[in-house]
Image (cartoon, rainbow, N blue to C red):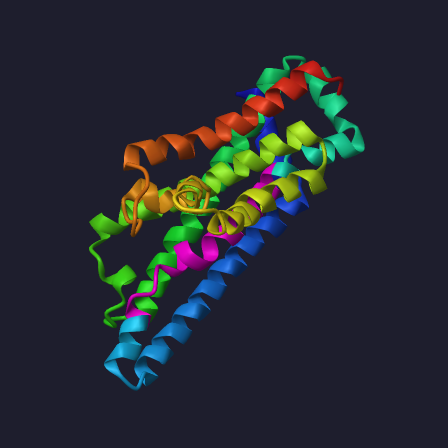
Amino acid sequence: MAVLAAEFVKLRSARSTFVVLGLVAVVAALGLLMAVNGANAWDEAGSAADRRRWEAAGAIEQVFLLPFWQLCLAVLGALAITPEYGTGMIRTTLAAVPRRGAVLAAKAGAVGALTLAAGAAAVAGTHFAVRSVLGDRPFDAYTAPMAETLPLLAALAASAAAAGLVGLGAGVLLRSTAGAIVTAVALVYALPMVARFLPDPWAERVSAVTLTGLPAEVAGTAPDPVLEPAAAGAVLAAYAPAALAAGAVALVRRDA
């Protein structure tokens, strides 16, 4: 617990933590502006068909904002470790806590808790703010009962936290902020884009297991689901342990 508390202090004392969290808030604010634009467009639509196109649009926080939040939190995870390699402070950390597994576990606990809280706050705050902006306009994604919406919101927040832990694992493995960020961009943006150009049925299969595609599969709201919710949840839950396991092997076997 002392090591975990120390890692929370490190996160709190790093200016980059607040910069990244500020970017998460900015992205949420942009989502609110998108909701205002959607409401105005619906009001000004000239036909029922035009209105229906707006009403059928997906949830803003899922379709447009999630990749940005995931990338921001993956960067936060990477910055929880890579500056220590850059400055050589990792030697001090490991001298104070010789058990390297305990160091990584504490960092994972701190990063996981922070990114889950940030992701949940961003997702829930945006969703309820968009609901208030849209009012009684019949947008499909915001008129469903909250009992049906909560699983998707929880899955979105969990995917954001998973991205943060993947960033941490990549940072430990690569020891490079740039390398970890490139890895996060590849997972969040490049892989889903490449998946679209794969032949059927691989396009749908690969898209379904990406960090951006899994929340809908977990919540059972995907238009053409590839995985059962339980299977999708298992895949999402495997992202962080896989990245952290790769980082742990590198941390234990290599010199600081």
In screen coordinates, is 108 left or right of 86?
Answer: left
98 and 72: which is toward the camera: 72
Magenta stretch: give its range. Answer: 54-77
- Is 144 magenta? The answer is no
Q: Position of residue 251 (x, y in %)?
A: 66, 20
Q: Is residue 210 visible?
A: yes
Q: Position of residue 61 (x, y in %)?
A: 41, 56
Q: Position of residue 36 (x, y in %)?
A: 40, 73
Which residue corresponds to the image point at 21% horizontal and 48% vertical from the top-left?
Answer: 147
In screen coordinates, is 209 left or right of 148?
Answer: right
Which residue corresponds to the image point at 78% horizontal and 34% vertical from the top-left?
Answer: 86
For the image, the number of numbered tags is 0
Image quadrant holding the C terminus, namely top right
Kindly indicate the quadrant of the structure image that contains residue 102.
top right
Q: Is residue 4 visible?
A: no
Kindly indicate the quadrant of the structure image that contains residue 202.
top left
- Is 74 magenta? The answer is yes
Q: Position of residue 238 (x, y in %)?
A: 44, 29
Kindly indicate the quadrant of the structure image that contains residue 168.
top right
In screen coordinates, is 158 left or right of 4?
Answer: left
Q: Residue furthest front?
A: 199
Q: What predominant SS class does the magenta segment belong to?
A: helix
Which residue corresponds to the image point at 72% horizontal and 17% vertical from the top-left?
Answer: 254
